[in-house]
């Protein structure tokens, strides 16, 4: 029985509300749970779920728990790196594999404990697919807690691919292309933090997207 779990989110990530929901679910199971936003505050316990982190967790801090688990949204070893959900939506994928993996020295290279699938219909905008991603993160962590004694992790096999970090400039639209050609890019932009934009005659124009009721 797992008794103490730490959830590490080392920034003001969008995942924080879902981390709190995960805490509520775990506490209902009678497990002590701690949320920290600094890896040096990780508790000595059974599991550390590493969610939405931007920094590599040191070996000293990994040694505090038996299991150190990362949620990564790709069918590893394909799709390692940054913003895999966004990049795959831009590619037009409608099935996104979510992998729960052991933290390792190499980025996103650890053993795979569990995998789930997020199914998209191709119309979801940023907040909608983020919600699906957050709920899937909660579910796969809970599944591990409930079933870890019956799960055997598997080594990643096959060729690797890597996604680069996304920046606000990656939300630029090409005014010479049709909207249909760029719709998946519009689906991943955040209207506030990194809105879609285009440039005409040296002037930048932001473009917000939302669904009509």
Image (cartoon, rainbow, N blue to C red):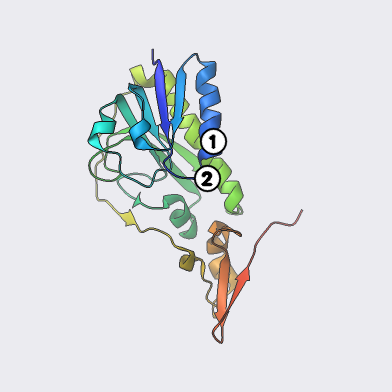
Q: Using the image, determine if residue 160 lies above or below residue 103.
A: below
Residue at x 55%, y 24% (from the top left corner):
24
Q: x, y (%) of residue 205? A: 61, 75
Report the Cα–Cα distance between label 1 and label 2: 8 Å
In the displayed structure, would residue 87 be above or below residue 73?
Answer: below
Residue at the spot of label 2: 14
Identity of the residue drawn at 51% across and 66% down? 171
Q: How many marks?
A: 2
Residue located beneath label 1 in the image: 18
Classify the position of the N terminus by image quarter: top left
Residue 71 located left or right of residue 122: left
Residue 100 visible from this viewpoint:
no
Relative to 196, is 134 above or below?
A: above
Q: Check disc 1 and report its element: helix, strand or loop.
A: helix
The residue shown at (35%, 36%) is: 39
Tell me the crowding category of disc 1: few under 14, some 14 to 19, or many 20 or more residues within 10 angstroms, Cα based: some
Q: In the visual, does 31 lie left or right of 155?
A: right
Q: Are marks 1 and 2 in contact (CB under 8 Å)?
A: no
- Residue sitting at the far right: 213
Give the quadrant of residue 32: top left
Q: Position of residue 87 (x, y in %)?
A: 44, 57
Q: Quadrant of residue 181?
A: bottom right
- Other residues around mark 2 within 10 Å, as few (<14) / some (14–19) / many (≥20): few
Name the secondary structure under disc 2.
loop
The quadrant holding residue 58 is top left
Q: Nearer the viewer, residue 61 or 103?
A: 61
Residue in the picture at 57% in, 71% down: 197
């Amino acid at each position: 029985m797992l008794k103490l779990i730490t959830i590490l989110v080392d920034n003001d990530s969008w995942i924080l509300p879902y981390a709190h929901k995960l805490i509520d679910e775990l506490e209902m199971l009678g497990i002590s749970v701690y949320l920290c936003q600094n890896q040096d505050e990780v508790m000595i316990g059974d599991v550390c779920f590493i969610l939405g982190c931007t920094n590599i967790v040191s070996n000293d801090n990994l040694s505090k728990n038996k299991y150190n688990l990362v949620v990564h949204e790709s069918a590893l070893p394909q799709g390692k790196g940054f913003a895999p959900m966004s990049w795959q939506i831009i590619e037009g994928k409608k099935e996104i594999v979510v992998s729960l993996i052991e933290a390792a020295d190499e980025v996103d290279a650890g053993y795979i404990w569990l995998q789930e699938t997020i199914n998209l219909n191709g119309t979801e905008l940023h907040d909608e697919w983020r919600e699906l991603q957050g709920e899937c993160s909660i579910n796969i962590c809970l599944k591990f807690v409930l079933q870890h004694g019956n799960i055997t992790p598997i080594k990643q096999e096959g060729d690797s691919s890597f996604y680069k970090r996304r920046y606000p400039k990656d939300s630029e639209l090409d005014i010479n292309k049709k909207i249909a050609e760029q719709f998946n890019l519009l689906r991943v932009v955040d209207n506030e933090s990194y809105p879609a934009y285009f440039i005409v005659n040296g002037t930048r124009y932001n473009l917000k997207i939302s669904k009509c009721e």
